[in-house]
Amino acid sequence: MAIVAHTHPFVIGVDTHARNHALAVLASPNGEVLDDAQFPATAAGLTRAVTWAARRTGGDLNVLWVIERIGTYGARLARAAADAGYPVVEAARMNARANRGVGKSDPMDARCIAQAVLSLDVTALRHPRADDGVRAAVRVLVASRDHMSTERTAAVNALTALLRVSDLGIDARRPLTSTQIATVTAWRTRGEDLATATAREEAIRLAKRVTTLDGELKTNTKRVTELLAQSPARELLNQPGIGPVTAVVALTAWSHPGRLRSEAAFASLAGVNPIPASSGNTIRHRLNRGGDRRLNRALHMVIVTRIRMDPLTRAYVERRTAEGRSLREIRRSPRWSMPASSAPASSTSTTTSTVTPGSPGTPRPRSTSAPLRPSTRTGRTPSPPPTTPTPNGSAAGPTRR
């Protein structure tokens, strides 16, 4: 087992902010602080930071850059350091209590960031996601889609509330349909009292905004589908219940071959691996509330779609229901082995094999290897992980998202 202190001669910790970045250079293996400095978060400042680090480390390209918030504030610096030929990783998790009473400043944070990785195994480093090509493009589109979906939901809710308060001729006791929204869009001003006329004008504006967002979402989906066809994730569309939006969410999380070292790592990233919560004679697991929640939500929608449309999944649900499982437990159970069919095919550490419900010998994520036994306190058997893998068989035309 090789640790960072034995494989890299220097480690540079970076505490990133919107205006300035603080850098600290530590020498391996003892973590001696050689120097620290701060640079503005501008193009010229980033160039100066990389040049300064090269002078302090003698131009050695094996220097490890550890950058905090590498996907946001530190994205441009990480790109500049990578373009210069340096290995770049994301900052490791740190214990805030360990520095209580010591104080806090940007240079001190930069030193702590570098010190936190010195004892880590090189395989445990958090490598950043790819920031170029199709993955970077669909990442922007997925973020835009989330924003548009949120805005559309807010507009529909506001329109529904307005139509329930004001008598404008639309029955809003149930969720509005696309036909009703189109009807509101075609309204014209009428000779009404001031309050009703104002409410009608606002209803027209909201309905037109919903219609506009519908068109933008369709354009977004079309563009996402075109980019998806150029990526390794295109093979995910052959799986039942997986559409272009779900596939690109998996692509943005997976990023590139080699980022995830195992199928269990992908399960942990998606937040679907069970967390051991045993004590004494009580052996149980709890749900993972962490991970990439967007990816977790995408996997959940795949399960929901398969339960509705996939015959093999419906048979699986019926069998698990007969065993006494609740619908909530059944929905959660298949997700423990979903990552195997939700990672792009070119990954070197995950597979995309098709699994039939109840087929023997199907591997499960290694993070769930601990056997489950009934709890001695509750008398119930915890739901995760299941003994049956995810149904991935082919089905005729499931609804895709």
Image (tube, rainbow, N blue to C red):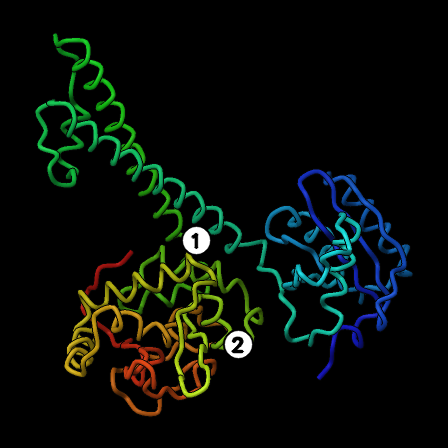
**Quarter of the rendering occupied by the N terminus:** bottom right
Q: Is residue 379 above or below residue 36?
A: below
Asked if residue 4 lies left or right of residue 280, the reply is right
What whole-number distance in Å separates the C-alpha atoms at marks 2 and 1? 22 Å
**Does 177 appear above or below 51?**
above
Residue 49 drawn at (x, y percent): 81, 48
In depth, the one of 183 and 162 nearer the eye is 162
Label 2 element class: loop
Tell me: 370 left or right of 91.
left
In which quadrant of the rendered view does residue 192 lie? Answer: top left
**Dividing the image into 4 quarters, which one contains the C terminus?**
bottom left
Front-lying residue, 13 or 315: 13
Q: Residue at x 62, y 66 (%)?
A: 126
Disc 1 target residue: 227
Relative depth, front residue between 161 and 205: 161
Q: Residues within 10 Å of mark 2 (few under 14, many from 20)?
A: some
Q: Element at badge 1?
A: helix
Is residue 207 rendered to the left or right of residue 341? left
Q: According to the image, label 2 marks what residue?
A: 348
Residue drawn at x 13%, y 33% as measured from the top left:
180
Residue 33's spot in the image, x, y percent? Answer: 87, 60
Amino acid type of the residue that numbered disc 1 sits on in the rendered structure: Leu
Q: Earlier in the sequence, mark 2 or mark 1?
A: 1
Q: Residues within 10 Å of mark 1 (few under 14, many from 20)?
A: some
For residue 102, above or below residue 317: above
Q: Amino acid at mark 2?
A: Thr
Residue lying at 81% horizontally and 44% vertically, measured from the top left: 38
Residue 276: give x, y in percent of width and height.
45, 78
Return the x and y of residue 288 as percentages of the image width and height: 43, 68
Disc 2 vs disc 1: which is toward the camera?
2
Q: Residue at x 27, y 23 (%)?
A: 205
Q: Which mark is residue 89?
A: none
